[in-house]
Image (cartoon, rainbow, N blue to C red):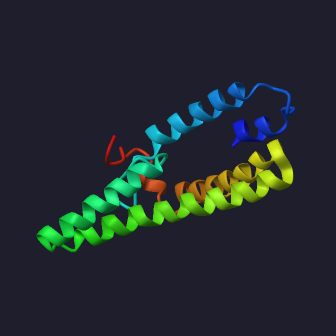
Amino acid sequence: MLVTLFLGFLPESVPFQFSQVAINFICSMQYNTFRQAEGVPMATTFCTNHVRQAGINLARLLQKGDAVYVKKSLRHGEMLIMFLIGAIIGTILCGMFVGRAIWGASIMLFIVFIDLLHADLTKEKGMLGRVPTGH
């Protein structure tokens, strides 16, 4: 959140590689931190992975008939929808605010931060020492 906030203050004349390296770094942190969603292992930073995994799970559903593959496929589909919504909102914000559009990501990251902090302090308070699945 702080990185995206900082990047929004950079003048448009700063080479784009500076922002690219910063974004790549925080994406790598996300990739290593969030290895699953709703109990389904996934790479949360890659939309192509979600297309692949949704297709694989649908094929497994057709082959094996196990309903567990429906849940997995739906989770990957939900992530694809989130990517699409983010791309649409990002495109609109870029047209309006150019480089300052990244602050839209800061707002979303702040909302996620508050949600995770609330969960850590309330319903998941006793789980702080537990190592998440996938790590």
- x and y percentages locating residue 26 in the rendered image: 59, 36
Q: Quadrant of the N terminus?
A: top right
Quarter holding residue 59: bottom left
Give the answer, above or below, for where 18 lies relative to 92: above
Can residue 36 be seen here? The reply is no
Give the answer, above or below, for where 111 lies relative to 78: above
- x and y percentages locating residue 121 in the rendered image: 56, 56
Residue at image x 81%, y 42%?
99
- x and y percentages locating residue 53 in the rendered image: 32, 56
Quarter holding residue 73: bottom left
Residue at the farthest left position: 64
Can residue 90 be seen here? The reply is yes
Residue 17 as seen in the image, left or right of residue 124: right
> Which residue occupies the foreground of this view, 36 or 12?
12
> Which residue occupies the foreground of this view, 92 or 104?
92
Residue at image x 31%, y 64%?
72
> Which residue occupies the foreground of this view, 27 or 17?
17
Residue 6 as seen in the image, left or right of residue 47: right
